[in-house]
Image (cartoon, grey):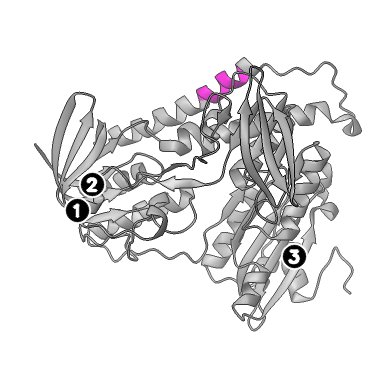
Amino acid sequence: MKYIDTLVIGAGPGGYVAAIRATQMKQNVTIVEREYLGGVCSNVGCIPSKVLISVGHRFEQVKHSDDMGVVAQEVKLDWTKVQEFKKGIVSKLVGGVESLLKGNKIDIVKGEAYFVDANTVRVIDGDNLQTYKFKNAILATGSRPVEIPTFKFTDRLINSTGALSLPEVPEKLVVIGGGYIGTELGSAYANLGSQVTIIEGGKDILAGFEKQMTQVVKKGLKKKGVEVVVGASAKGVEENENGVVVTYEVGGEEKTVEANYVLVTVGRRPNTDEMGLEAVGIEFAERGLLKVDKQCRTSMPNIYAIGDIVSGPQLAHKASYEGKVAAEAIAGENSSVDYLAIPAVCFTDPELATVGYNEEQANAEGIEVKVAKFPFAVNGRALALNVPEGFVKLVASKDDGVLIGAQIVGAGASNMIAEMTLAIEAGMTAEDIALTIHAHPTLGEITMEAAEIILGNPIHVVKV
């Protein structure tokens, strides 16, 4: 039996960050991971998917740059090299996580953890079993894809993990679920040459983003030949030697579509089962999530939970943030979560990014706001890059001009949202943004221009 101060279960972006912060707070730390360091994000999620998305963008741009004077002939995609490039990126990042953990003198243990009581865990790795006694524990076990009963995963019915390592770029791909994962990967494969059909049960794809934003993405999808079917219910699938036939219902009519593969992306389930948490007395919330307080503490005072297994958006950066809070709380610091501004990004084409309130949410809560929108189409840098689609939209309090939200759709939105996240966290006003000198020519100027519209003094659009 081994005795430690803090046990971290899960080495994803929440767990490994929590472990490092805990050692910085002078705690003796052991981290347990059953599958791979870096978690889903680094290995089969955020990072490898962005590699495929980047490759898809590059391939698409090379093929369609005639209007910029770049005429390419016989552009080819070497899928084997793409996969090797992706594996190299993943290997580099996972190796970096391991180096960080070892450099901070954190013991890394491979295996599955099972709680015996509130201070004891057994870690099983094959035939090996080790028992650990701990003062405190941080659960960072993440989530896994939801499997539909009528769409059981096979070689041709795949989840997001399978979509990242297909043996070839499919000629035809059906995506069940038009959320951010399905739309991102659907866009990537469309750029890589696949004929993509997205089947979504809701009224629109990309729920959680404003309709004005998603309209820009849908226009781009249509241009790529992607068929988007909303208000549809996936009924079943038949596999054959060459692929699959998906049956779905829309508007009371049953239809079928053929494809090489079906990608099922209808959500993720928290990994809170088969750990013995119920026996320990930890309280659950809805959908298998764990109840936690402002310091990420569960109903068991010495056990904390972060990331996808607690309420809130399933985002890697949220998990990392919560990991720091939990580690600091264990050390006795007055640290607690404050979700004033959590940015969310979707790497579609073009990108989507949002933080804080959107206009509809502000109105629903009775907050009087000023709203301003400035288009990419009149920004010099956007035109030079040949990416005129999109806009920046700012939401500010009507009384004092304090920024409470921002929405960006367009090239570089994932990077541009950082300025607005900081502005909201710092309680800055539209005037603060407008008076900040932004380098020219840059996409960042679009944010400044939107702020000037809120102030009623726009320069590059005619005041109405």
Mark 2 highlights which residue?
276
Please say if the residues under marks 3 and 1 sit with CB atoms less than 8 Å apart.
no
- Separation of marks 2 and 1 at Cα, in angstroms: 7 Å
Question: Residue 446, percent across and down?
Answer: 75, 58
**What residue span does the magenta drawing correspond to?**
81-88
Q: 410 or 109: which is nearer to us?
A: 109
Q: Is the residue 171 above or below the residue 145 in the image?
A: above
Q: Residues within 10 Å of mark 1 (few under 14, many from 20)?
A: some
Question: Residue 266, percent across and down?
Answer: 56, 45
Is-magenta flag for residue 80?
no
Report the predominant secondary structure element of the magenta stretch: helix
Mark 1 highlights which residue?
280
Kindly identify the amino acid type of the residue bearing the numbered disc 2.
Gly
Q: Residues within 10 Å of mark 2 (few under 14, many from 20)?
A: some
Q: Is residue 57 left or right of residue 140?
A: right
Residue at the spot 26% in from the left edge and 31% down from the top edge: 111
The disc, 3 or 1, on the residue closer to the chain's N-terminal end is: 1
